[in-house]
Amino acid sequence: MTVRARYRLRDYKITADPVTPPSHQAVCVTGEDADCGADSDHQETEAAVERWIAEHTRDTGHDFYRRARWDFVNTEPGAWR
Ligand SMILES: [Zn+2]
């Protein structure tokens, strides 16, 4: 038996949210078998994340991080294609 499905594609307009500021985060990924996993949580500025990284390195000697800038967007459904 053959099952066929038909999908319709739709365009979406994605724009930066005008009121929610971006947030910044770092996670310590130092470790051989498993990452340390310490998390800065969401910070308002990149400088705050860098301060958290510096303090974590000072306290632990860990030296490898994943860092991200999160921004917020709104979507608006558009035309069907
Ligand atoms: Zn760590």
Image (tube, helix red, strand yellow):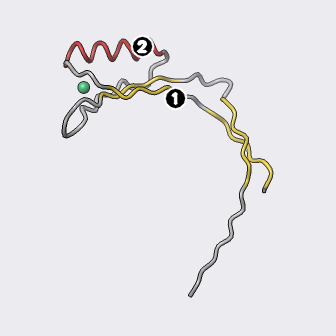
In percent of the image, x 33 and y 17: which residue is there?
53
Query: Ligand 1 is located in which of the four quadrants?
Result: top left
Q: Residue at label 1?
A: 70
Image location (x, y in percent) of residue 76: 73, 42
Q: Residue at label 2?
A: 48
The quarter holding residue 6 reads bottom right
In percent of the image, x 72 and y 45: which residue is there?
12
Give the left or right position of residue 3, taking residue 46 as reference: right
Mark 2–mark 1 CB contact (< 8 Å) = no
Please state, as top left, top right, bottom left or bottom right, where the C terminus lies in the image: bottom right
24, above or below 36, in the image: above
The quarter holding residue 37 reads top left
Number of on-image labels: 2
C-alpha distance separating marks 2 and 1: 14 Å
- The residue type indicated by label 1 comes to Trp
From this viewpoint, which residue is outermost toward the right? 79
Give the left or right position of residue 21, taking residue 31 as reference: right
Look at the numbered disc 1 and give the secondary structure of its residue.
Answer: strand
Image location (x, y in percent) of residue 52: 34, 16
From this viewpoint, which residue is outermost toward the bottom? 1
Image location (x, y in percent) of residue 72: 59, 31
In percent of the image, x 69 and y 38: which residue is there?
14
Look at the numbered disc 2 and give the secondary structure of its residue.
Answer: helix
- The residue type indicated by label 2 comes to Ala
2, above or below 66, in the image: below
In percent of the image, x 64 and y 73: which residue is there?
5
Image location (x, y in percent) of residue 27: 34, 28
Between discs 2 and 1, the one toward the N terminus? 2
Q: Which mark is residue 31?
A: none
